[in-house]
Image (cartoon, rainbow, N blue to C red):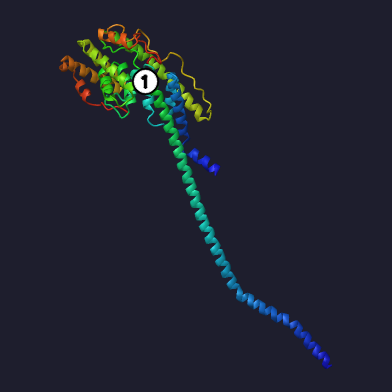
Amino acid sequence: MTTRIIAAIAAALLFAGPVFADDKDQTQTQTQDPTTDEAAVQDKTQTRDRLHTEDQLGTGDKTRTRDRLHVDAEASGDQTRTQARDQVRAAMAEQAGMPADAACLPGEGTGDKVMAQGQTHTMAAERAALRHADRKSAREQVGEAAATHKGTGAGQGMMGGSGMGSGDCTQAAETTRSGDMRGSGGMMPGGMR
Amino acid sequence: MIAQALALLLAAGPSSAGADEHLLVGAQRFREGRFEEALVEFRVAARMGAPGTDTYVASTLVKLGRNEEAVELFGGGDSPGPDALIDYYRALACWGARLYGCADRLLAGIGDRSGPKVSEQAARLRAAIAAELRRPLTAATVDWYRGRCEDEKRIGRKALSEAYCREAAALAARRGDRARTPGTAQAATGGSGGRQ
């Protein structure tokens, strides 16, 4: 009987041990939980801070990169613009010639006639150029970038008639003409040296 | 990164880039003597917002013999600007429009600011103008300039009109009949600022 009682107590103790241990663990866990949470929070905070910092740095980097790209793009644009203007200037310098017509003060009527002729051509050519420019702009706006670079037609820029110097010019003008300037008086595209 | 770069390049101004492209093509056409085509390219560039393209358009108009339009676009002034080459084209425009006084003042301002070729040509043109202006001036000549002044005013080309008025006033003064030029003296003193 005694033996049975001892065995029962031993068994009870054996079962109770883990229970107490679980309680202890649970207590310990409960005790540790705030710590763990704090650590986790701290970890999260730190992580968040780190991520935030990284984000900030990253954003800063991105911003810097974007700024740099923007500056690069602007520099590239400026460079292209400068190149384009240099090209235009070079072409202008190359084509800077002498006038085809001699100096000739208008006098007894021929000037008016010639000017009127010039105006007629001027207006027609202007209209044609603007029409072409409008068409071209429209094409570009709708994305048809492969615009042809055809002109508005040959001869529209010519000034007809015999030229300014045909009638009322003086000997001074004639002298000039026979020297360095051409005497035809017609002002054709490219008619300057 | 590449996408960002492309986006930024696009954002940097596609119209500007397009305008530059037209300027480049215009320059090529100008160099080749294809001035009608150059004119179109420069005008398109101007419409696309490229700044300062008016002088290129005006210079091309000079090459096409459309000098009056060029004078109007240049601004009609005869004060030398910062660019001697542009001044030379302005002088050619004045010459072509028979504004010899205007041309002479612009050519005088070129001096040796330009290259030897343009400077030498400017000197020759000035000599030609001086020779022409040594002639006795007739009333018909002065009247012609006055007429042009009025005509251009009527059709709204203000700068060109003022340039003709100044020329009329200067020639009238040279003839000694300043009293016959009402309204032109004022034009002679004002509005001579050119576009540059």
Residue type at mark 1 is Ala
Q: Is residue A165 above or below residue B87?
A: above
The residue lying at 17 percent from left, 14 percent from top is B175
Task: Return the chain for callout 1.
Answer: A
A77 or A144: nearer the eye? A77
Dot 1 corresponds to which residue? Answer: A96
Where, quadrant-wise, is the C terminus of chain B in this rendering? Answer: top left
Give percent across and percent down for residue A25: 67, 77
The residue lying at 64 percent from left, 75 percent from top is A29
Give percent across and percent down for residue B168: 22, 17
Give percent across and percent down for residue B126: 27, 18
Left or right placement of residue B145 versus residue B3 in this view: left
Residue A83 lies in quadrant: top left
Q: Is residue B54 above or below residue B127?
A: below
Neighbourhood count class around disc 1 (C-alpha, 10 Å): few under 14, some 14–19, many 20 upward: many
Q: Is residue A124 above or below residue A86?
A: above
- Furthest toward the front, the residue is B116
Left or right placement of residue B6 versus residue A180 in this view: right
The residue lying at 43 percent from left, 13 percent from top is A155
A138 or A76: nearer the eye? A76
Residue A17 lies in quadrant: bottom right
